[in-house]
Image (spheres, rainbow, N blue to C red):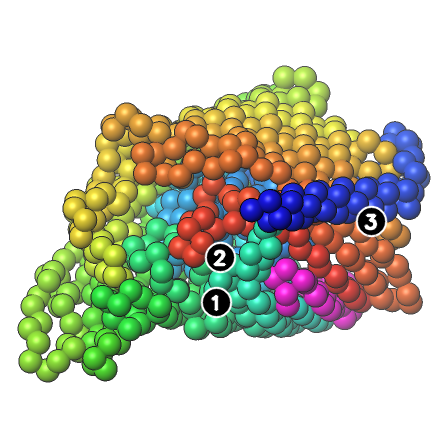
C-alpha cells in the first residue's frame, strides 16, 4: 500500500531527525555549559588529586590493589553505580569489561561473567551467600541499588575464599553502614527518582549516628514501575514491578581490640512481571509473575584486631538468609491447567572465620566456613474443571558445605610477589522421598513414589598460584593459574519441573564441574591514567547442562569438555581537572569441545566509550556509548543477535547549603531510542525480549 509505505518512511525519517535533535541538544548541554578543562598536571588543591588505583578486599580477604592482584578483579563504588540511574545493579555492572547482562526482566536480571552465569557465579550480600533458584531471575533484584556502598567482582576462580560455585566468578555487594567517629555526628540522605520508561518512581532514605564507641544506621526504600516500552515503542507485556525494603544496623566497639556489628536486611517485591523465559521450561504464551518474593538477612560480625603479634585481624561472620519466592504462571494453553503456583523457601545458615596474619615478607589469610542451604517447595495447580492438585518440583532437600582455606602472599622481592591459595571442602546433598502429589487432584488419584530419598557426598578442592611483577615504575604484569570446582546444586540433582511444555529431571549422581583456568594481565597505573589488558582461558570438564532426551523429557547431564577464552582491555584517563575519559572492550569465545560446536550463552564483542565531568560541587555530566557487535557464534538451537549501540547521557547540579548537599539530576538512557536486544536475553512475549527504549529519569538527592 503506497500510502502506508509513505507514512512508514515519514515516521522513520521523523524518528531519525528527532534522535539527531536529542543528540545535538545533549552534546551542546554537556560540553558548552560545563566548565572548560584545566590542566590535569596542576591540581588546585590536594582534593583534586585523584588516584585511579583501586583496592579490592574480596580476592584475598584483605586490602589489595587491583593491579597487584593476579586474576581478573573489578570494583564499582556506589557513586559510579548510581551515575546512570540504573533500574537494578546488573544494569550498572555491565560497564565492567567481561560482565554482561542476562535479562529475564528489568527487576532482577542475571550477570554473566566471561561466558558463565547463574549458578556458576556466586552472589554475596555482605559476604552472605544468596541461594535461590536461578532458572528465572531471582537474585540480583533482591537488593536496592541505593543501599550499596560498593560491588567487588572476581572474574573466575581467582580466590580460595569461596568454594563451590566460583568457576564463573564472584559478585560481592557490600552495603552501606555506619562507622566509628571521634566526634559524634548525624548523617543521612534522601533520594527521589521519577522515570518515564518504565513509568514510575523510586524513593530511598537513610539516617545514621556515628560515635566513638558505637554507631546506628537505618534505611528504607520503595519503588513502583509499570511496563516498559522498547525502542520501537512496543510495550513489553508483564514487565512491571514494585518493591520496598528496609535495613537496621548497629556497631559497638567493646575496647581497642574488639568490635561487633549486627544487621537485619529486608526487601519484599510484589507483582514482579517476568517477560523473559530464562532457563525454565514453559509454554511461549504463559505469563510468569512473582506476586510476592522476600529476602531477609540477619547477620552478626565480630572483629578482633590485636595490637601486636603475628595475627593482624580475625573476623567471625554468622548469618541466616531466607528467600521466599512465590510464582504465578497463567495464560497457559487450553490443554494445560488454568494456572500453576510454584512456591519455595530457601534458608541458608552460614559461619565464616577469617584470619589475616603477617610474618616477614608473608601475608597469610587462613580460615574456615560452613553453610547449609535448605529448600522446601510446593506447586499448586488449578485445573479447568475447578479441581486443585498440589505437587512439588523437588522433595525437601538441603546441601551442606564445610571447608578450610588459606592464602599466602609472599613478597619475594620489592618487584615480585607470589600468591598461592587453596581450600578443601566436604559437600553433602540430600533429598527426602518424592511423591507424585502432596495433595492429589482427586482423592482416589494414584500417588506413586517417583524418587526415593537420596544423599550424595564428595570431597573437592581448589588450588591457585599467581605472580605479580612490577617490572618498571607504574607497570605490572600478573599471572594466575587455578583449578576450581562447582558441586551440583539441589535443583540439578533432585528437581522435577513440569510447567506445561516438557519435564526437566535432575540427576542425583552428577559429577562436580571442574575448571582449569589461566590468566595474564598487563597493568599501568599513574596519578591520571590507568590502563590494563588481560587474556584468559577457562577449560571446563563435566559441565552440567540440560539435555533433550525426547519431546517430553529433558535431563541434567555432564558434558565432557568445554573451553571459554577471551581478552579484555580497559582505559581510564583523567585528562583535565575533573574531566575523565574511559573506554573498555571484552571479547569472549566458547566451545563445546565434546560435541564440536559453539557453546551457548557466550556474549558478543562489546565495550564502552565515555566521558564525564564530576567535581564535588557545581555542574556534573556524563556521556557514554555502550555497544556490541552481532553474535553469530552460537549453539545449534541458539538465536543469533544483531549488533547494537546505546547512547546514554546525564547532567546534574550539586550545591552545598549550610550543612546539607543537594543534587538535581536529569539522565537519559538509550538516547537514540534504539530497538535492540541483549544476546543473553530470553523471551516468550515477544519471542525476542528487547531492551528498554529511551528512558528519562529525573532525581533529587539530599545529603547531610
Callout 2: SS: loop
The residue wearing badge 2 is 105
User: Residue 304 in the image: x percent, y percent?
Assistant: 55, 56
> Tag on residue 118?
none
Q: Earlier in the sequence, mark 1 or mark 2?
A: 2
Residue 415, quarter of picture: top right
Q: Which mark is residue 272?
A: 1
Residue 187 pos. (x, y %): 75, 68
Q: Earlier in the sequence, mark 2 or mark 3?
A: 2
- First in residue order: circle 3 vs circle 1: 1
Residue 494 horizontal/vertical position (percent) = 21, 56
Find residue 328 and report its image quarter.
bottom left
Q: Between residues 467 and 575, which one lies in front from this camera angle?
A: 575
Q: Nearer the viewer, residue 58 or 671?
A: 671
| Residue 180 shown in magenta | yes
How far apart marks 1 and 2 lie (CA) works out to 9 Å
Left or right: 346 with respect to 106? Answer: left
Compared with residue 455, is residue 641 higher up or lower down, i.e. above or below?
Answer: above
> Which mark is nearer the camera, 3 or 1?
1
The region drawn magenta spans 174-200
Q: Which residue is mark 3?
A: 620
Amino acid at each position: 500500500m503506497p500510502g502506508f509505505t509513505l507514512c512508514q518512511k515519514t515516521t522513520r525519517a521523523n524518528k531519525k531527525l528527532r534522535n539527531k535533535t536529542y543528540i545535538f541538544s545533549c552534546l551542546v548541554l554537556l560540553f558548552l555549559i560545563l566548565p572548560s578543562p584545566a590542566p590535569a598536571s596542576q591540581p588546585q588543591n590536594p582534593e583534586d588529586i585523584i588516584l585511579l588505583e583501586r583496592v579490592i578486599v574480596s580476592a584475598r580477604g584483605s586490602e589489595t590493589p587491583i593491579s597487584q592482584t593476579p586474576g581478573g578483579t573489578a570494583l564499582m563504588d556506589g557513586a559510579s553505580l548510581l551515575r546512570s540511574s540504573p533500574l537494578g545493579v546488573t544494569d550498572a555492572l555491565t560497564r565492567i569489561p567481561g560482565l554482561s547482562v542476562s535479562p529475564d526482566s528489568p527487576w532482577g536480571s542475571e550477570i554473566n561473567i566471561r561466558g558463565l552465569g547463574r549458578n556458576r557465579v556466586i552472589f554475596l550480600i555482605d559476604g552472605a551467600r544468596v541461594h535461590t533458584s536461578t532458572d528465572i531471575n531471582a537474585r540480583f533484584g533482591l537488593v536496592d541499588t541505593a543501599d550499596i556502598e560498593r560491588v567487588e567482582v572476581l572474574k573466575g576462580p581467582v580466590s580460595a575464599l569461596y568454594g563451590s560455585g566460583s568457576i564463573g566468578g564472584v559478585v560481592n555487594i557490600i552495603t552501606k553502614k555506619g562507622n566509628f567517629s571521634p566526634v559524634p555526628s548525624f548523617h543521612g540522605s534522601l533520594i527521589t527518582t521519577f522515570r518515564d520508561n518504565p513509568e514510575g518512581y523510586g524513593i530511598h532514605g537513610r539516617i545514621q549516628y556515628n560515635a566513638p564507641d558505637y554507631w546506628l544506621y537505618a534505611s528504607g526504600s520503595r519503588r513502583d514501575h509499570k511496563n516498559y516500552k522498547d525502542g520501537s515503542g512496543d510495550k513489553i507485556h508483564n514487565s512491571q514491578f514494585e518493591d520496598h525494603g528496609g535495613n537496621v544496623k548497629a556497631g559497638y566497639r567493646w575496647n581497642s581490640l574488639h568490635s561487633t556489628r549486627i544487621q537485619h536486611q529486608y526487601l519484599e517485591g510484589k507483582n514482579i512481571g517476568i517477560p523473559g523465559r530464562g532457563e525454565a521450561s514453559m509454554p511461549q504464551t504463559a505469563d510468569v509473575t512473582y506476586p510476592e518474593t522476600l529476602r531477609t538477612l540477619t547477620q552478626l560480625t565480630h572483629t578482633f584486631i590485636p595490637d601486636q603479634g603475628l595475627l593482624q585481624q580475625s573476623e567471625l561472620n554468622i548469618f541466616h538468609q531466607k528467600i521466599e519466592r512465590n510464582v504465578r504462571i497463567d495464560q497457559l494453553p487450553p490443554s494445560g491447567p488454568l494456572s500453576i503456583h510454584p512456591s519455595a523457601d530457601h534458608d541458608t545458615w552460614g559461619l565464616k572465620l577469617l584470619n589475616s596474619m603477617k610474618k616477614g615478607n608473608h601475608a597469610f589469610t587462613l580460615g574456615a566456613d560452613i553453610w547449609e542451604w535448605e529448600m522446601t517447595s510446593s506447586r499448586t495447580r488449578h485445573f479447568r474443571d475447578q479441581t486443585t492438585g498440589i505437587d512439588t518440583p523437588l522433595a525437601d532437600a538441603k546441601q551442606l558445605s564445610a571447608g578450610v582455606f588459606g592464602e599466602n602472599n609472599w613478597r619475594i622481592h620489592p618487584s615480585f610477589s607470589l600468591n598461592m591459595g587453596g581450600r578443601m571442602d566436604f559437600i553433602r546433598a540430600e533429598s527426602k522421598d518424592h511423591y507424585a502429589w502432596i495433595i492429589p487432584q482427586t482423592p482416589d488419584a494414584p500417588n506413586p513414589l517417583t524418587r526415593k530419598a537420596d544423599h550424595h557426598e564428595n570431597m573437592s578442592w581448589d588450588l591457585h598460584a599467581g605472580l605479580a611483577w612490577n617490572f618498571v615504575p607504574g607497570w605490572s604484569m600478573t599471572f594466575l593459574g587455578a583449578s576450581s570446582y562447582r558441586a551440583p546444586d539441589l535443583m540439578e540433582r533432585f528437581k522435577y519441573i513440569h510447567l506445561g511444555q516438557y519435564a526437566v529431571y535432575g540427576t542425583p549422581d552428577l559429577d562436580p564441574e571442574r575448571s582449569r583456568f589461566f590468566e595474564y594481565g598487563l597493568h599501568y597505573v599513574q596519578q591520571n591514567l590507568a590502563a590494563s589488558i588481560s587474556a584468559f582461558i577457562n577449560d571446563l570438564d563435566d559441565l552440567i547442562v540440560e539435555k533433550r532426551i525426547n519431546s517430553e523429557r529433558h535431563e541434567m547431564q555432564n558434558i565432557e569438555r568445554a573451553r571459554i577464552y577471551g581478552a579484555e582491555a580497559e582505559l581510564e584517563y583523567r585528562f583535565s581537572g575533573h574531566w575523565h575519559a574511559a573506554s573498555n572492550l571484552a571479547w569472549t569465545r566458547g566451545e563445546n569441545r565434546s560435541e564440536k560446536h559453539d557453546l551457548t550463552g557466550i556474549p558478543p564483542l562489546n565495550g564502552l566509550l565515555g566521558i564525564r565531568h564530576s567535581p564535588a560541587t557545581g555542574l556534573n555530566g556524563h556521556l557514554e556509548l555502550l555497544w556490541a557487535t552481532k553474535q553469530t557464534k552460537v549453539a545449534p538451537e541458539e538465536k543469533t543477535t544483531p549488533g547494537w549501540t546505546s547512547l546514554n547521557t546525564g547532567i546534574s547540579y550539586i550545591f552545598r547549603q549550610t550543612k546539607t548537599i543537594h543534587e538535581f539530576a536529569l539522565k537519559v538512557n538509550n538516547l537514540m531510542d534504539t530497538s535492540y536486544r541483549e544476546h543473553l536475553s530470553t523471551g516468550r512475549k515477544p519471542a525476542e525480549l528487547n531492551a528498554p527504549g529511551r528512558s528519562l529519569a529525573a532525581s533529587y538527592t539530599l545529603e547531610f
